Amino acid sequence: MTDVLQDTRRATGHTRWVRIAHAIASVSVLTLAFSGFVILMAHPRLYWGDAGNDLTPALLELPISRNYLHRGYGQPVPFFVGAAAPVSANRTYDIFNQNGWARSLHFLAAWWLVVPGAAYMLTGVFGRHFRAHIWPARQDLAPHRIWREVADHLHLRVAAASGGPHYGVLQKTAYSLVLFGAAPLIVATGLTMSPAVTAAVPALLRVFGGYQSARTIHFFTFGALLLFVLVHIVMVVKSGFRRQIRAITVGE
Amino acid sequence: MKTTGLITRRRAIAAGFTAAGGLLLTRFPKALPPTYGNLLRTADTLTYATHRALLPQQALVKEYTEHDLTSFPATGTTNPAVNDKAPLGSVYRRLHEGGFAGWSLTVDGRVATPRTFSLRDLKGLPARTQITRHTCEEGWTAIGQWTGVPLSAVLDAAGIMPTARFVVFYSYDDWVDSIDLLDALHPQTILAYGMNGRDLPVQHGAPVRLRVERQMGYKSMKYIHRIAVTDEFEDGGKKGNIQNGWAWYTGI
């Protein structure tokens, strides 16, 4: 029963550069997730459009720090005459804010993800790695194969680890979505939050619908990546944890 | 056959990186802010060097219309006079009671002629009005209209020395911060005395605050009373961002 998928999975092992890229990505993604969460705690409200703050309505408020629900402002003073006029109000309490180190840590980890990540992507695109192992091949997309994979996954039938490619079609699809979808999207929305970058590339603000929209998309893309990492870990455990860890670290 | 191809590709990539590196080096800033051996700050410095090397130097941030104005939280210091113990606090109280008629701005350091400007002097210089997005490191944004004099006009009036590289600001809430000449001479970097069509309110930095639109909000210092031009980077000591655990360059 466990060798249902065996025919499509010949062991070729992870090449050294894939193992190095995986190690760097693991550490930087974990650091980004941790520092990103600390940054979000300073202002756990999400908005759409260009502007959003404690004095404007939120799309979503996350109960993850004492800044949640933003109580602690003085009497609002309108800037103009009229009921709908924008207001100013003084903050009257100390918020939770560890961004002094959390922001710098986030950007440090981002450099470690983006520079080796770009090298990985270039190598993958111009080498044969992506075409041979990551991008779903035409024969992968035959309906009966997709159906069999879906059925196997639904029944939690996981083939024993081969210690590297070849991968199943759902696995390839998941990796492709991360590499060609989520990763570029989370980098682009991150850059859209940089006022220096959007001064140089104003199109970023138009593409994502504004600074706060980009911040919101950044957060939900993180959510998708988190889901991927959780499923990834479950699959690693179910297919033979020790074997898989050995394959992705020391190789074989 | 295959080996030859691999070496050629590697050579091509290596040549590309070398060429790009040579191109970038010439555009790197002469001096980078110190990192104090702090690993976190190396990433901020890398970001600074990269922005200065890759981004167009005088690109303008997006400007909005009056319909886009939003509510605007006043955070950090909302009135320097509240801190009675600080000598600057009581000075600010007296100036505020006198409608800032006695306020003046000192411009000194590496300039040809040190100058002082009254509020009236500043308002006599050609003004610029811009509606821009204030981007707080906490994660919120607000859109406000700012009227003031371009910092470049004030620096021109004093005549900066050819060796000058940084501009340091001193505020009534006893804060010291600096920006490089590229940001100082940026067309949207202004000393604002008006907000949303009226005099700048006390909670937003009266009588004059800085607007540095390509960086995070905390670089746009409130309650300015002195500007010093320097040749060397100065961190502001215990009154500056770096020693308080905050990044100096925040274009991201």
Image (spheres, rainbow, N blue to C red):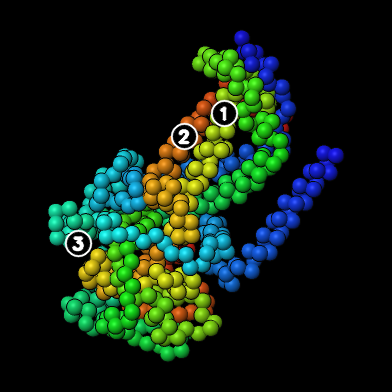
Give the quadrant of the C terminus of chain A. Answer: top right
Left or right position of A15 against B171 = right
- State the residue at coordinates (39%, 47%): A209
Which residue is the site of mark 2? A224
* Residue A123 seen in render: yes
In this view, the residue in front, B125 or B247, is: B125
- Identify the residue at the far right of this view: B1
Decide which of tag 1 and tag 2 comes sooner along the chain: 1
Q: On what subunit does the disc labeled 3 rest?
A: A
Left or right position of A244 against B58 = right
Give the quadrant of the N terminus of chain A. Answer: top right
For label 1, the crowd category at 10 Å Cα-Cα, with few meaning under 14, some 14 to 19 and many 20 or more, is some
Does dot 1 land on a helix, a strand or a loop? helix
Identify the mark at residue B29; answer none if there is no mark: none
Does dot 3 land on a helix, a strand or a loop? loop
Which residue is the site of mark 3? A79
* Cα distance between the residues tagged 3 and 1: 52 Å
Residue B132 position, x and y percent, is: 34, 61
* Cα distance between the residues tagged 1 and 2: 14 Å
For label 2, the crowd category at 10 Å Cα-Cα, with few meaning under 14, some 14 to 19 and many 20 or more, is few
Which residue is the site of mark 1? A173
Residue B13 position, x and y percent, is: 72, 51
- Residues at marks 1 and 2, common chain? yes
Q: Work out whether B11 lies above or below A138.
A: below
- Residues at marks 3 and 1, common chain? yes
Decide which of tag 3 and tag 2 comes sooner along the chain: 3
As shown in the figure, which amino acid type bears the numbered disc 3?
Answer: Phe
Q: Nearer the viewer, mark 1 or mark 2?
A: 1
Task: Say whether marks 3 and 2 touch (CB < 8 Å).
Answer: no
For label 3, the crowd category at 10 Å Cα-Cα, with few meaning under 14, some 14 to 19 and many 20 or more, is some
